[in-house]
């Protein structure tokens, strides 16, 4: 079994890391470059930076922030939010990011996944997907619907079907975020994570809901099968170190990079 990855997510708004519950009630926590450098020092496997209002505001991502992160951390990091076209992808990668995450843009223009994969390689393209639990219908048979624009807009697209399509277009990884779990600390949404893992052959990152270190082990176990667990509140607010999270996963019998 490959080593399971621990990824810290830093949502950025107006140049500050911010955290809320279900994308609401956000409070600012600090400078993204400094916080990213601290998590790198603690031994995190990867980082993700999301500009959570860029798409809704119709603007590009802060490239100076990306350059600042690249100068201070020497592990893979992804950037999402404000990616509007292939040129924006290119600029983010040239600024030092290893991966680009597309979410709302990919739903609006799925071909951007194929274009990005062709231009930069599948490994650079991450599909960010926010899934909302809904009643099972003919159009949403999984019971999970894709939502965009920070959870503000429903799409009518089934989450599992969208994951399969994104893989076929060339996405190299899927970051699956549960809207219902986001910031609640009640645990990851295991059902949709399991469904997406079983539906695709590319790595799946579980996101949304981690409230204690044991939650990471739950979603990474073979019964669910996520390749990586993404956290935010655990490290930003609750004060857990990356080492403590990895130790909990290791004690559960799963391989991690110590």
Image (tube, helix red, strand yellow):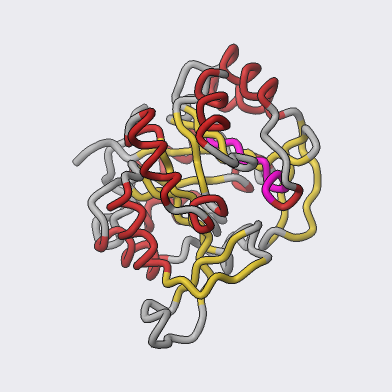
Seen at 31% across and 44% down, the residue is: 170
Q: Is 198 included in the stretch rendered in magenta?
A: no
**Residue 99 location, x and y as percent?**
45, 32
Res 236 → quadrant:
top right
Q: Is residue 38 above or below residue 157?
A: above
Q: Quadrant of the N terminus?
A: top left
Q: Is 51 included in the stretch rendered in magenta?
A: yes
The count of marks equals 0
Q: Is residue 47 left or right of residue 237?
A: left
Q: Quadrant of the C terminus?
A: top left
**Residue 180 location, x and y as percent?**
58, 69
Seen at 55% across and 50% down, the residue is: 105
Q: Is residue 87 left or right of residue 236?
A: left
Q: Is residue 119 left or right of residue 232?
A: left
**Residue 36 location, x and y as percent?**
61, 26
Q: Is residue 87 above or below residue 148?
A: above
**Residue 115 location, x and y as percent?**
39, 39
- Pick the front one: 178 or 234: 178
Seen at 26% across and 62% down, the residue is: 199
- Pick the front one: 133 or 250: 133
- Pick the front one: 10 or 250: 10
Res 25 → quadrant:
bottom right
Q: Is residue 90 above or below residue 67?
A: below
Q: Is residue 184 left or right of residue 194?
A: right
Specify the segment rendered in magenta.
48-55
- Pick the front one: 69 or 247: 69
Residue found farthest to the left: 1
Seen at 43% across and 42% down, the residue is: 126
């Amino acid at each position: 079994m490959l080593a399971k990855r621990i990824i810290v997510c830093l949502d950025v708004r107006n140049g500050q890391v911010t955290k809320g519950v279900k994308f609401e009630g956000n409070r600012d926590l600090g400078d993204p470059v400094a916080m990213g450098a601290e998590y790198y020092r603690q031994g995190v496997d990867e980082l993700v930076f999301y500009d959570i209002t860029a798409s809704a505001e119709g603007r590009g991502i802060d490239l100076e922030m990306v350059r600042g992160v690249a100068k201070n951390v020497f592990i893979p990091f992804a950037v999402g939010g404000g990616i509007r076209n292939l040129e924006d992808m290119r600029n983010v990668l040239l600024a030092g990011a290893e991966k680009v995450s597309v979410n709302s843009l990919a739903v609006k223009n799925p071909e951007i996944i194929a274009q990005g994969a062709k231009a930069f390689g599948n490994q650079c393209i991450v599909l960010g997907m926010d899934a909302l639990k809904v009643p099972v219908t003919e159009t949403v048979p999984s019971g999970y619907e894709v939502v965009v624009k920070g959870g503000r807009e429903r799409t009518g697209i089934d989450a599992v079907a969208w994951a399969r399509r994104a893989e076929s277009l060339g996405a190299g990884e899927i970051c699956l975020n549960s809207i219902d779990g986001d910031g609640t600390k009640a645990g990851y949404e295991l059902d949709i994570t399991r469904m997406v893992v079983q539906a695709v052959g590319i790595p799946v990152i579980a996101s949304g809901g981690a409230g204690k270190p044991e939650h990471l082990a739950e979603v990474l176990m073979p019964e669910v099968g996520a390749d990586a667990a993404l956290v935010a509140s655990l490290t930003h607010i609750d004060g857990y170190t990356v080492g403590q999270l990895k130790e909990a996963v290791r004690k559960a019998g799963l391989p991690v990079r110590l």
